[in-house]
Image (cartoon, rainbow, N blue to C red):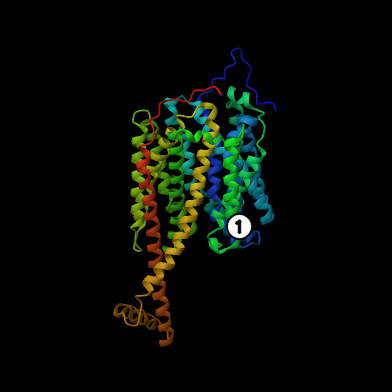
Amino acid sequence: MASESLPTNTTGEMPKVNPWVVATAVMFATFMEVLDTTVVNVSLPHIAGSLSASVDEATWTLTSYLVANAIVLPITGWLANYIGRKRLLISAVIGFTMASFLCGLAPSLPVLVIFRIIQGATGGVLQPVSQAVLLEAFPPEDRGKAMAFWGLGIVVAPMLGPVIGGWLTDNYSWRWVFYINIPVGIASVVMSSMYLFDPPYIRRRIGETIDYWGLGLLAVGIGTLQVILDKGQEADWFGSPWVVDFTIIAIVAVAAFLIRELIARHPIVNLRALKQPTYSTGVFLMTLLGFGLYGAMVILPILLQTLLGYPAVDAGIAMFPRGLGSFLMMPIVGILMSKVDARKLLLLGVSGTALSMYLLSVLSLNLGYWNIFWPQFLQGLSMALVFVPLTTITMDPIPLEGMGNATSIFNLMRNLGGSIGIATATTLVARATERHINLLGANVTPFSPRAQAVIAGLRAMFLAHGADPVTATRKAYAALFGMVEQQASMLSFNYVFGIMTVVFLVMIPLIFILRRPQGRGAVTSH
């Protein structure tokens, strides 16, 4: 198979392109894909109503995207070597943009799910390829600045997603949630065509044999795992036969895939990169980071909507301080990366994130807006201090020809960590709420003077509003149970945010295993 050829020159060197132009080109692609992972969430009720489906059925538009995304992510490095990085990136952007347009036109839910699968498959290519291109375009000493610029899209897009999705859905239609990708996709294709070029070592490796067994095992293992993580809570986890069956399939397929990749001559995913201690530790830290951040990101809007009564759009706006903090801090981190040991910045960022989670874990029902604003703003600042140094440190020991494979594994583990974090957080909130209702409800008895005083006060209030004695008593008990449920829910959210605090504290000792970036990354021989 022919590669995407470079412009001919006498030296055989790659054309000189301003790296910031390259960064802008890949930023468009990345921002579009990351935005689309969250922009649909708030539109689900509207999608369900418009396509004559239930909200539960409509959630397959999210699940199908995540499954396809997870399957493609780890093989992106291999795909780039097989067909060429430039060709792969442009094809993925075109596919994602066309799938977005077709999602907007979808006449039924099954059709929408099919186009979301295409979106997820093409979108899974964009992050790791964009990251590999970016790290390669800049010299080692400037990679911190490059990652800070790229990180703006990664960090800010998930914050803007719910706000943009809610606004478009309320003011226009849920279909515009997909149409907004079209101009961004066109800009990305034009810039990528003009300014991106395949390095020589990728052109040498185009046309390698395909590991069909590895590809099949990966699709089955990662696909079933993602379905379990996304739908397990709804099915009561291992209380459902299909979850048990899918779990067995996932374990067997993933185990067989790992064995296959270790013995294959041309593996789909080169797991040998994990032998490098700094890289493997960085991948593990990124997995924990995804677990904590994605888990917290999902349950916070639930807290705002169920306990404080925020509409979906207002809940999205209330979460904006996190994106604001990251937006302000990213450029500063980019400058500091060339002046300060990246591990110190990472330590500061992880500590700040742990503190922000702790502040969320001590909230009460009488919280105000600023009680939500400051922990999130601190978390946004800290995320910038975590994301840029961690990515730069982790990728530093990887040679350039292994960058695509390394970024694929790195992004896959972040997404899997996030999926596990979301599943864990939502399950823990539900289970902890039941437990706290039982504990608090045990104190609401006819023998509790305090409980009887509250009931008497509520009954008097309902009587004053015209209710008869029997109705007033019934409403008083219902209101008291509602108060117990609210308090139990708040305690369960506190509990989960406390667990996320511990997750980030666990990350701190692992930082000392990482080596300071040495500015490596030269092409090495096979």
**Of the pair 261 and 119, the residue shown nearer to us:** 261
Residue at (52% x, 22% y) in the render:
524
User: What is the quadrant of residue 12 in the picture?
Assistant: top right
User: What is the quadrant of residue 331 in the picture?
Assistant: top left
**Of the pair 241 and 305, the residue shown nearer to us:** 241
Q: Is residue 25 visible?
A: no
Q: Residue furthest left?
A: 449
Q: Amino acid at mark 1?
A: Asp
Residue at (43% x, 34% y) in the render:
277
Which residue, given by chain and number where applicable, does mark 1 sit on?
245
Could you say where residue 340 lies in the image, as x and y percent from the top left? 33, 31
Could you say where residue 17 lies in the image, as x and y percent from the top left? 54, 22
**Which of the image's four quarters has the N terminus?**
top right
From the viewer's perspective, is residue 507 above or below residue 55? above
Residue at (66% x, 56% y) in the render:
109
Could you say where residue 494 lies in the image, as x and y percent from the top left? 37, 59
Left-right relation of 487 to 202: left
Under circle 1, the secondary element is helix
From the viewer's perspective, is residue 397 above or below residue 439? above
**Of the pair 321 and 277, the residue shown nearer to us:** 277
Q: Residue furthest top?
A: 10
User: What is the quadrant of residue 216 in the picture?
Assistant: top right
